[in-house]
Image (tube, helix red, strand yellow):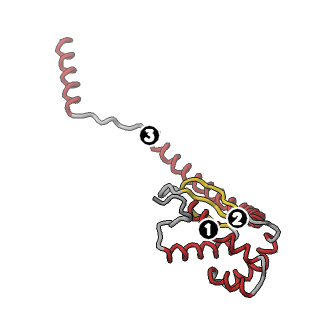
Amino acid sequence: MRHGIKGRKLGRTASHRTATLRNLATALLEHKKIKTTLAKAKELRTYVEPMITRAKVDSVANRRVTAQDINDKEIVKELFTTIVEKIGTRPGGYTRIVKLGQRLGDAAEMAIIELVDFSEISIEKAKAKKSEEPADKEKKEKSAKAKADKADAKGEAKVKKEAKPKKEKVSASTKAKSSAKKTQIANKTV
């Protein structure tokens, strides 16, 4: 039994698991916020937070240890300068995990993991996108109006076709019945 064994295997071999965590850590430090599964987010938290704590002391040794896990020099530089400047006063808890619910394809629990003091950056990006969206909304509204006009034109054509009286189709058996009735009526009157 695996009682009290720390860490998640994430369905991967050891080398694949370390590569996954290194890539997730690099993406988190680059974008400040990523969307992943809940298990990966929780495991990433235990991987990234000691790295950020180590970055508080800017030394060549700490940079080299961190560079073993993060292969992008620019992100290592950013970690030791901008990220630590913002997070440096915290005694820990540099990341936040927000649960999102289940993914449609396989019902995996999804989550967003973000650096705590960088949440306003994501809010500013969202505001910038919203300011760009009105132009997109106008384009969408115009295309929706054009589609509605086409649908109305098709609808009017259908109405015109329906306005014409349709000739009823009479089968041969009903014709025979009606002619038999006519002969009976004619015989009775004579």
Q: How far is the residue under mark 2 from the one under mark 1?
A: 10 Å
Left or right: residue 184 compared with residue 157: left
Q: Nearer the viewer, residue 129 or 8?
A: 8
Picture residue at 70% right of the left edge, 81% below the top: 76
Q: Which residue is mark 1?
A: 44
- What amino acid is labelled 2 in the image? Thr
Q: Residues within 10 Å of mark 3 (few under 14, many from 20)?
A: few
Q: Nearer the viewer, mark 2 or mark 3?
A: 2
Q: Position of residue 140 (x, y in %)?
A: 64, 59
Picture residue at 73% right of the left edge, 73% below the top: 53
Q: Residues within 10 Å of mark 1 (few under 14, many from 20)?
A: many
Q: Is residue 47 above or below residue 38?
A: below
- Identify the element where label 3 is drawn: loop
- What amino acid is labelled 1 in the image? Leu
Marks 2 and 1, the one that precedes in the sequence: 1
Res 33 → quadrant:
bottom right
The answer to whether residue 33 is visible is yes
Say which mark, if any, is on residue 164: 3
Q: Is residue 66 above or below residue 181?
A: below
Q: Position of residue 133 (x, y in %)?
A: 71, 62
Q: Nearer the viewer, residue 50 or 181?
A: 50
Picture residue at 66% right of the left edge, 63% below the top: 113
**Quadrant placement of the C terminus:** top left
Say which mark, if any, is on residue 95: 2
Marks 1 and 3, the one that precedes in the sequence: 1
Q: Position of residue 165 (x, y in %)?
A: 41, 37
CB atoms at circles 2 and 1 under 8 Å apart? Answer: yes
Q: Position of residue 20 (x, y in %)?
A: 55, 73
